[in-house]
Amino acid sequence: MSAFAANPQVELVTNKGKIVLELYPDKAPATVANFLQYVKDKHYDGTVFHRVVADFVVQGGGFDVKGNQKPTRAPVKNEAQAAFKAGLKNDRGTLAMARTSDPNSASSQFYVNLKNNDFLNWPGRDGAGYAVFGKVVAGMDVVDKIGAVKTLPGDTPVDAVVVESARELPAGAAAKQS
């Protein structure tokens, strides 16, 4: 008998607290590989949650603390359909890729759902939906804290919510923290 490898986990250390994300490479392989490469490249270190919409989502991964957009790699193919069919939905606490109106434009930006957002699931309003590829397994209270910050018009937080670091955790590390 062989044991299944544990799903990869990533710890985001923010100025509001720590968040641990569990990723699902078996359900959204290209999306997870893309996200993990950005983590390994330290792309997310020093980025902000630039879009916070209470009772909807917190979004980050694309801008530094000065509001400059960070350079990205080529976008990944939208895996929303496959992820949805594998049971991943834009439910509270899930992690998904942000994108433009082009379904295949997701690069580094991600969001965490603050509530169930069924309209973001495949096929969605545009026939494509948004690819869920993980979920918060620790620190949802931190996500909620971020979701409650004061924002300016355009949903930008008044005070920056900074991702100080993003690191992949060694296998089993998060389970030991609990």
Image: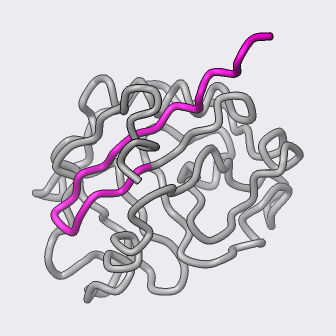
* Nearer the observer, 101 or 89: 89
* Magenta region, residue range: 1-20
Residue 28 quadrant: top right
Q: For the N terminus, give its image quadrant.
A: top right
At x 27%, y 34%, the residue is 43
Residue 65 quadrant: bottom left
Residue 146 quadrant: bottom left
The image position of residue 131, as x and y in percent, is 68, 48
Is the residue 37 above or below the residue 55 in the image? Answer: above
At x 64%, y 37%, the residue is 24
Is the residue 85 above or below the residue 15 in the image? Answer: above
Classify residue 158 as left or right of residue 78: left
Q: Is residue 16 magenta?
A: yes
At x 77%, y 61%, the residue is 121
Residue furthest right as drawn: 85
Q: Is residue 7 magenta?
A: yes
The image position of residue 145, as x and y in percent, is 32, 79
The image position of residue 75, as x and y in percent, is 53, 31
Is the residue 158 above or below the residue 18 in the image? Answer: below
Q: For the C terminus, give its image quadrant.
A: bottom left
The image position of residue 172, as x and y in percent, is 46, 32
Is the residue 65 above or below the residue 119 in the image? Answer: above
At x 57%, y 40%, the residue is 105
Classify residue 156 as left or right of residue 24: left
* Nearer the observer, 55 or 11: 11
* Nearer the observer, 172 or 62: 172
